[in-house]
Image: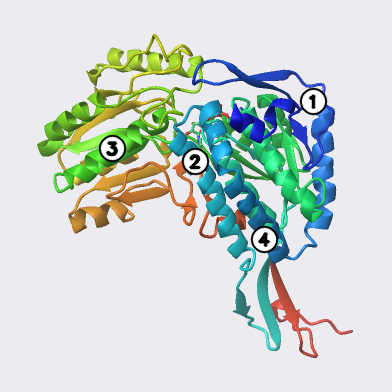
Amino acid sequence: MDFLHVLNIAEKNNGVSTGVKWIPTTGETITSYTPVDGSVIGTVNTADRNAYDHVVQQAQDAFVEWRKWPAPKRGEIVRQIGEALRTYKEPLGKLVSYEMGKSLQEGYGEVQEMIDICDFAVGLSRQLHGLTMHSERASHRMYEQYHPLGVVGIISAFNFPVAVWSWNTMLAWVCGNTCVWKPSEKTPLCAVACQLIVSEVFAKNNVPEGVSGLIIGNREVGEWLSTDTRVPLVSATGSTRMGKAVAAAVAQRLGKSLLELGGNNAIIITKDADMDIAILGALFGAVGTAGQRCTTTRRLIIQEDVYDTVKDKLVKAYGQLSIGDPLNEKNHVGPLIDTDAVKMYLDSIEKCKAEGGRFVVEGGVLEGKGYESGCYVKPCIAEAQPEYKIVQHETFAPILYLLKYKTLDEAIAIQNNVPQGLSSAIMTLNLREAEQFLSYAGSDCGIANVNIGTSGAEIGGAFGGEKETGGGRESGSDAWKAYMRRQTNTINYSTNLPLAQGIKFDI
Ligand code: NAD
């Protein structure tokens, strides 16, 4: 396939690298299957403990050099990576689509997010600023500055196989850190591709070997990172189950963790909603990426007066969805990542029915020509109750629950009454409703939108969520501060040393 050759992946079955160099490893082999048609794309050798230790050691050594580079010079490297990503946008986007199964437009969109974060990080490299404050002591000056942390470990999920890594690394790099990436074992080739793109830029610019470490492997390799005292910050994106394990391991050694975990995102549709916007936002949010976004719309909380209208319009819209090969731009919905995900989807449908849920659009697995991988499922819609166990749970598949409400207070309570707190939205043209939703008494999520669905986000804002979503923030705004340590400095330019609490020594 042309895009595989462009990225030279077919010839590369090593999954461990310190940047430009690939490190020998005896780790087990992972085979990457595409959910598009079930065929093998390639194999990758995972990190064994020796190779892992080598990569982290090299990252530590490189840090001593890299932190000396002025931040705008590091920004210049990131700018060149952004340029390289522009060059490789098409083949990399296709690979993302082929290995992960998201639609081609979404594959390109994911690479565009990488380019956007590079642009953001370049500007940021000239703005890593702290505050100055007036001292209570005469002829003293106080200020704060931010220094890099050291080696940043990045554990990422399958559903954004390249963008999440770039959100972390581009910021971490301009901040002066070195990075070690443990990508999802379900999308190893996307990670190899990114490493190859970065290594071209690094080699041209004599970037110290070790600034960009790659350690492909299973959960165990992620556990090595979480428990490693040489890694001051672990940024982990994935399920809440994984986040709890990583948080406990990192806290045990008093390290820092940045957690981006599961969501259970809802849109409230009030009777003052613009119905066209509401339906489009709900549809895109619920079926986009086959329901495998952390920000996927999983619950619609609908005012009773417009409940039937919304339901009917959605049922009609679902009837027009075309499901199939994500590389074919005519299709709206591609496959789930693997057959385990299909089992979870089917299991959740059964659980919903057992709790009393009524499906108004039936689910099921598609069979026959074009669906040979067994990973294509029908997006479905169930009428449910907010307290159902299955409604409280994030099923990473296109199952949408319809919930009915009378008053906005009730709708907000339903929206908040789940363990997760990532993304939320309200569809209304009523200013009072919108402001209540955004107020302290409104949505408890990290992201709260008005007349925009829950799914996706712009890189300029800080991205992340509360409660079981983990509390971390990545990407824009001041998310960069998570990758640095803050230091408060006081400078005395007087001729005395005024001591605290007026204490005096006769010397
Ligand atoms: P997952 O938790 O199964 O795996 C994610 C990563 O964690 C993988 O690299 C995996 O090898 C590693 N891992 C698993 N257990 C670990 C452990 N005990 N210690 C260290 N590493 C471990 O998640 P997934 O199925 O790949 O992704 C789907 C999940 O990710 C969903 O819950 C989704 O909501 C979440 N997600 C969240 C965000 C966000 O920004 N909030 C973004 C993307 C995905």
Real-space Cα distance between discs 4 and 2? 24 Å
Disc 1: which residue: 48
Few, some or many C-alpha atoms within 10 Å of disc 2 (few <14, some 14-19, many ≥20)?
Answer: many
Give whichever of discs 4 and 2 has the lower sequence position: 4
Disc 2: which residue: 108
Real-space Cα distance between discs 1 and 4? 32 Å
Real-space Cα distance between discs 2 and 1? 33 Å
Residue placed furthest toward the front: 2
Give whichever of discs 1 and 4 has the lower sequence position: 1
Real-space Cα distance between discs 3 and 4? 38 Å
Q: Where, by quadrant of the figure, is residue 162 drawn?
A: top right
Question: Left or right: 147 with respect to 398?
Answer: right
Amino acid type, residue under disc 1 in the picture: Asp
Q: Is mark 1 within 8 Å of ligand 1?
A: no
Residue placed furthest toward the top: 368
Give whichever of discs 3 and 4 has the lower sequence position: 4
User: Horizontal and vertical percent for residue 253?
Assistant: 72, 40
Few, some or many C-alpha atoms within 10 Å of disc 4 (few <14, some 14-19, many ≥20)?
Answer: many
The tag on residue 282 is 3
User: Horizontal and vertical percent for residue 189?
Assistant: 64, 29
Amino acid type, residue under disc 2 in the picture: Tyr
Viewer can see residue 124: yes
